[in-house]
Image: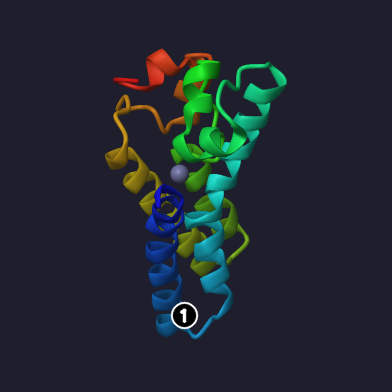
């Protein structure tokens, strides 16, 4: 059940953004863009999981660890490098500079909606989704989460 929630809570808004963009512009690839930036950025959790695993910090089964996110607690680190206001902004600026404003706006908007949903779903420091803040705090879970 929790896994379905984890998948659907970002898939549905991303699909809505993508199909709305398609409806407004007639550009079908914007659906893919919205799903890529609004849904699939969660693939960065795999890096955190495997880094915790390589460091011998996984205490649950991998299924339980992935579903519950307990690898964050057991490793004491939160990296999730794609969960970043800076990268969402960079996406907009790079695609805009290339003259592809639709890709920039739709991708950046879906990305920011993902971050907003995550931010209000968890107890996080106000700066938690600034990658620079997490780097500055050395990805320390105690600095990133307001409660663990
Ligand atoms: Zn996320």
Q: Position of residue 110 (x, y in %)?
A: 43, 58
Front-most of 37 and 85?
37
Query: Which quadrant of the figure contains the C terminus?
Result: top left
- Respond yes or no on whether mark 1 lies under 8 Å from ligand 1: no
Q: Position of residue 137 (x, y in %)?
A: 47, 14
The vertical placement of 91 against 57, above or below, is below
Front-most of 84 and 80?
80
The residue that mark 1 highlights is 22
Q: Quadrant of residue 50?
A: top right
Q: Position of residue 143 (x, y in %)?
A: 39, 15
Label 1 CA crowd tier, 10 Å (few <14, some 14–19, many 20+): some
The residue at 40%/13% (across/down) is 142
Give the residue furthest to the right.
Answer: 54
Q: Is residue 139 visible?
A: no
Callout count: 1
The vertical placement of 82 against 138, above or below, is below
The residue at 44%/69% (across/down) is 15
Callout 1: helix, strand or loop? helix
Q: Position of residue 45 (x, y in %)?
A: 56, 38
Q: Report the side of 56 relative to 60 (left or right).
A: right
Q: Report the side of 148 relative to 101 (left or right).
A: left
Q: Quadrant of residue 105?
A: bottom left
The vertical placement of 30 against 57, above or below, is below
The residue at 68%/16% (across/down) is 55
Q: Report the side of 71 relative to 130 (left or right).
A: right
Q: Is residue 31 visible?
A: yes
């Amino acid at each position: 059940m929790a896994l379905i929630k984890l998948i659907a809570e970002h898939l549905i808004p991303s699909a809505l953004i993508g199909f709305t963009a398609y409806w407004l512009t007639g550009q079908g690839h914007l659906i893919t863009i919205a799903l890529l930036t609004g849904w699939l950025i969660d693939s960065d959790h795999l890096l955190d999981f495997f880094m915790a695993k390589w460091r011998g910090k996984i205490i649950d089964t991998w299924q339980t660890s992935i579903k519950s996110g307990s690898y964050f607690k057991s490793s004491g680190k939160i990296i999730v490098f794609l969960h970043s206001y800076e990268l969402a902004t960079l996406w907009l600026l790079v695609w805009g500079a290339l003259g592809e404003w639709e890709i920039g706006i739709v991708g950046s908007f879906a990305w920011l909606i993902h971050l907003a949903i995550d931010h209000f779903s968890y107890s996080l420091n106000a700066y938690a989704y600034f990658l620079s803040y997490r780097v500055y705090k050395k990805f320390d879970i105690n600095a990133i989460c307001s409660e663990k």
